[in-house]
Amino acid sequence: MTESAGPGKSADLSRRGFLCSAVGSAAAVLGGAAAVSATRPALAQSTLTPEAALKELMDGNERYLGGQLQSLNEDLAILKAKTAEKQEPFAAVLACADSRVPVEFVFDQSIGHLFVVRVAGNITTPEITASLEYGVAVLGTKVLMVLGHGSCGAVKATIEGKAVPGQIGALYAPIWPAVNEAGPNLDAAIDANARIQATLLSQASPIIAGAIKEGNLKVVPARYDIASGKVSLLT
């Protein structure tokens, strides 16, 4: 028996067309997400050189700037399952504790890709150095970035040198060399601090210095611009 094409039948066909279109769109999105996950494994560092690891960071920042984040499309359940027992981040980042510096977003990286250590003023201390040595010696990170940022309160407070409550003043001593070098210019002091901390890590830690000498690690200072979101490598 042939069905008649009345108003109700037209509505059914419209609904079917809409559902088919929606299913097709969803499949395309899921397929894209699967493709992203396939090309960005959680155990990301195993085949990367230090140069390639640094490029991966900077390429991620370009996606962040362009509003084309890939990490948000990755299947977090799969990533969690793959990293539950083991981690192999391809990069370590020493960043400031400032809440305006969302490191994973800034570099468009997801679970298992970055080994992030955060402390006000992105300074090195024995505990910080030990953590980063673990990232290099045990986890095999290929690049270590010291990431300063604009409007850093810790550097600004060190320049002003005012009395502060509690143990906040303990941050001043590691930042003083940068202030002495750059003077009262906040931006210059922020950049000098990132460079000095990177140099300290490169030279004072036998583990990090050894990895650099063997060509297995690159240590770089950088600056994050809070207003634009851009990360610039410092020379």
Image: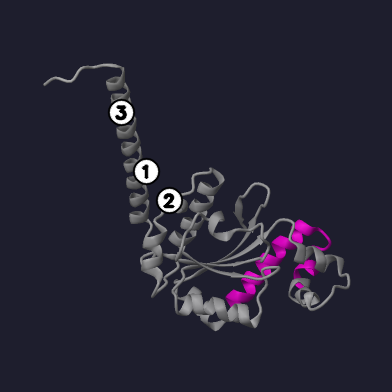
Look at the image and tell me in which quarter the C terminus lies: bottom right
* Whether residue 232 is situated above or below residue 15 in the rendered picture: below
Q: Label 1 is placed on what type of residue?
A: Val
For the residue marked with disc 3, what is the amino acid?
Gly
Q: Residue at x 49, y 51 (%)?
A: 59
Q: Are marks 3 and 2 in contact (CB under 8 Å)?
A: no
Mark toward the start of the polypeptide (3 vs 2): 3
- Residue 220 x %, y %: 57, 64
Q: Are marks 1 and 2 in contact (CB under 8 Å)?
A: yes
Compute the Cα span from label 3 to label 2: 27 Å
Q: Label 1's element?
A: helix
Q: CA distance from mark 1 to mark 2?
A: 9 Å
Would you name the residue on which mark 3 appears?
17
N-terminal label among 3 and 1: 3
Segment tinted magenta in the rendering? 177-203
Mark 2 nearby-residue class (10 Å; few <14, some 14–19, many ≥20): some
Amino acid type at circle 2 is Asn
Query: Residue 87: x and y, percent?
Result: 42, 72
Q: Which residue is mark 2?
A: 73
Most common SS among magenta residues: helix
Location of the N terminus (image quadrant): top left
Residue at image point 36% right, 65% down = 47
Residue reaching furthest right? 162
Mark toward the viewer: 3 or 1: 3
- Mark 3 Cα shell of 10 Å, populated few (<14), some (14-19), many (≥20): few
Residue of label 1:
29
